[in-house]
Structures are given as C-alpha cells and as structure tokens.
Amino acid sequence: MIKIRSARVSDAQTLLNIYSPYVLDTTITFENDVPTIEEFAERIETISEKYPYLVAEKDGKILGYAYASAYNVRSAYQWTAETSIYVDGDAKGEGIGKLLYQKLETYLTEQGVVNLLACITEDNQGSVKFHEKLGYDYIGKFKKVGFKFGRWLDIVWMQKTLNDPVSNMDDLKYFKKIG
C-alpha cells in the first residue's frame, strides 16, 4: 500500500537520488547541475514553511515526491501555486503521481489556493498527458526559453482551478499552511 506523507529534511538524500537522473539525463528540469544535499534539504525546509511537500512511500521506501511552490513572490500572486512532481524511474506507471497530486490538491484547496500552474518542457508529452488527465488545461507555450543539452527548448503552461476566486476581499480566507 502506498502512503502519502509530508516530506522531512531527513528525506533529502533519497529525494535527491530520485531527482538527480532528471537533471543529468533529461530536459524535464532545466537545472543543469545536481544540487548538493545541503541545497536540497534547504529547498525542502523552505518550501514546507508555506506549501505542502509530499512523499509517496511503499513498504518504507520513498518512490516519488510532489510539492507546490510560489508562482511569483509578489503578493497579488499568493492565490496561485506552481506544482512539481518527480517519481523514481523504477516506480513509474504505478499510480504514484496521481496519488501525490490528489493529496497535494486536497491540501492546496484547504489552503485557499485558487489556481495551480504546471510548467512543462514541451517534449515531455508524458507529463502533458498526465496533467490533462488530472484536469489541467493547456494555457500556452513559451518558445525557446530554456537551453539544455545543446538545444533550445519550449515550455508549455497548464492550469487547474481549485477554488472559485472571489471579488470581495472580506470573503477571502487568508492563505495558511495545511498538512
């Protein structure tokens, strides 16, 4: 049985082991250098202060992780979050991504997040289809905004609405950490 729980800083090495092949072998992330364990642990700690950062475990082994982060630091964007997900290469196709996103969206809905955004390298059609199945809409494409492995890469943006936006500020629940 797969268990979804909040990530801990002590998970950093395992999560970095999952992430590293994406950095070294794919254009799924535009990061060119694998972060240090210290940098990765700091990311977990910083993101977890405000947003859910989740791991999927099966029999005590972490098989993937997902988190939300600020789309933009300006306060007007506080109701929009960007999602990220990485699954161990040996665990793909087991439904881990769907479980992670379902729990992530539950927490973000409770926090009052209105919109989720996913930034995806255009040639990562598996991720595009994954997000479509989960109700994300294609919003647009930014052409040749990343350069990795000697080629220019386009990104697509996908969006999902979690909560109805309200126009009356008195009705807004202020963003709060959940989970």
Image (cartoon, grey):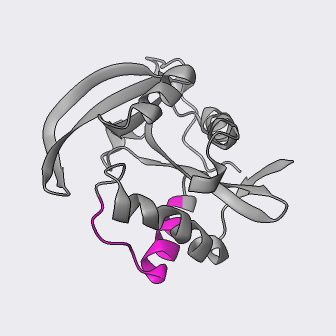
> Can you give x and y, in whole percent of width and height, for residue 68 in the image?
51, 47
Residue in the image at 81% along x and 51% along y: 3
Rendered position, 97 above or below 73: above
Q: Is residue 42 magenta?
A: yes
* Near-viewer residue (56 or 107): 56
- Specify the principal SS of the magenta part: helix
Rendered position, 138 above or below 27: above
> Can you give x and y, in whole percent of width and height, for residue 123 in the image?
30, 36
> Can you give x and y, in whole percent of width and height, for residue 28 in the image?
36, 48
Q: Is residue 157 magenta?
A: no
Residue in the image at 67% along x and 48% along y: 178
Residue in the image at 61% along x and 71% along y: 14
Residue in the image at 47% along x and 25% along y: 129
In this orientation, does residue 69 appear?
Answer: yes
Q: Is residue 122 left or right of residue 102?
A: left
The magenta region covers 31-47
Rendered position, 169 above or below 36: above
Q: Is residue 167 left or right of residue 53?
A: left
Rendered position, 64 above or below 114: below
> Can you give x and y, in whole percent of width and height, for residue 66 in the image?
57, 50
The quadrant holding residue 102 is top right
